[in-house]
Image (cartoon, coloured by chain):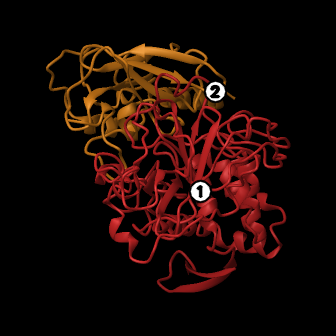
Chain colours: A red, B orange
Amino acid sequence: MRRVAVAVVAAACTVSSAQKSFDVPSSEGFRYVSEMLGARCGSLDCHGQAGRNLRIYSRFGLRLSSADVPGRGQTTSAEHEANYASVVMGEPELLSQVFGDGGREPQRLTLVRKARYQESHKGGRAVDAYGDHCIVSWLEGEIDKKACFAASILQKPPGFGTAGGSGGASTGGAGGQGGLAGSPSGGAGGTGGAASGGTGGTPASGGTTGGGGYTCGMEFWPCALDVYAECSAAKLSPPGHQVYAKADCQSCHGATGPGQEFLLSGVVWSHDTKAGAEHVQVAVKSGADFFLTCSDQLGFFFVPAAGQPAPNWPKAETHIRAVLGEKIMPADKEHKPSCNSSDCHAHAEHTLWAP
Amino acid sequence: MRRGSLTVAAALTLTSACKDPVLEARVEALGPDTGPYPAGPNHRAGAPCTLCHMEGSAASSPFDLGGTVYARVSTKEGLGGVKVRLFDNDGDELGVVTNEVGNFFLREGELGPIDFPIWVELEHQGEVTAMQAPIFRERSCATCHADPAGPSSPGHVYLREEP
């Protein structure tokens, strides 16, 4: 819970003002709601405009910092905070009442009515069942991160992105969404290992909206992998290893280097902190082989060679994901063991930002 | 009774003469067309087409959608022959090709069954690039893709990043 103070002008013809305080849902964890609002409401032609009462900042829309540009980098903490302020300040009295009632009758809020299209809204129905549940769960005091995550990934239409991969940005867009209540089945690769699991899975069931998109076992990620459970690196980088964060890992960890031999390796970064991002799943799929690893406390990730067959790089698919989303490496970009070579993700323009 | 009818007639006349001052101001802000092309498919490359090409605005031919595609991020060299592929969530797809200055447009009704949100992909001689997020309702690319790039605009539409 958070208490916000709002200056209220008492009457139209008075110069005095009074402050009122309201108990409103917490800003803690609001970034999950904010990511969803950014994806579904925050485009530049909708609420990603400075003139909007409900002004939404996001990576794909309006940016808060003059140094940031739509479509590049991640939504920042400051942007999530600004979105929180925008949502909270819309109807603070009503929000406080709804929150005080445990989220009961959330349609008292214009935000909810507009999103559900229960009230005139140029954008029509802006949220699906997941998005609605995301907002309501925040109003209830416990954010459903899974619902927010599912709603923050817009399902791409059939045929889109099949003409040869997307260029432009260093990473492609996110995948679609699956059912919330899907029953995971099918094998999974252990951390750092290669496994041919994931082929026997059944599509997630229980999802009530969306359809298509990411369904475990049928798509890239095996069913048993839970993105919501934070992954852990099998082996942590030694202290001080961050001095090598911009170096080509394979120069030491290749077949002839002095370090442990890796099949693939690199570094993933947090756009917020500009430091290495921990708990990011990195996976390469090559035919029936699935190579999975997780970034460590410094953002380093690797898959040990250890006698495993190397991926068929020209045919390989590479994805990374964390709780806020997924990134898919475009098919037309070179996939290779050294993610961090100087002309790839070690290059300042191609920094591998975590979702 | 007679007075009432006259009042209604006067109100209707006033309504039909009414203009949108906000729209007029935005069209005015575009400034004069400085060429080099006369009014037609090649003119005003990079301008928000549907500001004028909409019902009730300056141009006589309303567009469903329009924009300009440039070759690179760093220059304003319009690129002809780019296939602009539009997709919607119902599986409908439509392609339109840019003209010699990079302009493309769909006249009123030509968008057909394609409905918002619209996902856009550009294809030119084997090179492909795609928007990371869909268009939710804007009909002019340049309204969002204005130059220079900044916090409220990714800059003009381009096919490739390298100079």
Q: Position of residue B69 (x, y in %)?
A: 31, 26
Q: Chain of mark 1?
A: A
Q: Quadrant of the N terminus of chain B?
A: top right
Secondary structure of the residue carrying tag 1 is loop
Q: Using the rendered image of the protein, determine whether residue A109 is visible from the camera's viewpoint.
A: no
The amino acid on which the numbered mark 1 sits, given as a three-letter code, is: Leu
**Quarter of the rendering containing residue A212:** top right
Disc number placed over residue B53 in the picture, else none:
none
Q: Position of residue A30 (x, y in %)?
A: 62, 67
Horizontally, residue B142 falls left or right of residue A52, namely left
Q: Residue at x 61, y 17 (%)?
A: B113
Both on one chain, marks 1 and 2? no
Disc 1 from disc 2: Cα separation = 62 Å
Mark 1 nearby-residue class (10 Å; few <14, some 14–19, many ≥20): many
As drawn, A176 above or below A255? above
Identify residue for label 1: A324
User: Between residues A225 and B104, which one lies in front from this camera angle?
Assistant: A225
Q: Using the rendered image of the protein, determine whether residue A308 is visible from the camera's viewpoint.
A: yes
User: Between residues A161 and B150, which one lies in front from this camera angle?
Assistant: A161
**Quarter of the rendering containing residue A280:** bottom right
Q: Residue at x 52, y 30 (%)?
A: B119
User: Between residues A340 and B41, which one lies in front from this camera angle?
Assistant: A340
Q: Nearer the viewer, mark 1 or mark 2?
A: 1
Horizontally, residue B27 falls left or right of residue A51, namely left
Q: Quadrant of the C terminus of chain B?
A: top left
Asked if the residues shown at circle 1 and circle 2 are in contact, with their CB atoms under 8 angstroms apart, the answer is no
Q: Position of residue B148 (x, y in %)?
A: 25, 45
Identify residue for label 2: B5
User: Between residues A334 and A138, which one lies in front from this camera angle?
Assistant: A334
Secondary structure of the residue carrying tag 2 is helix
The amino acid on which the numbered mark 2 sits, given as a three-letter code, is: Ser
Mark 2 nearby-residue class (10 Å; few <14, some 14–19, many ≥20): few
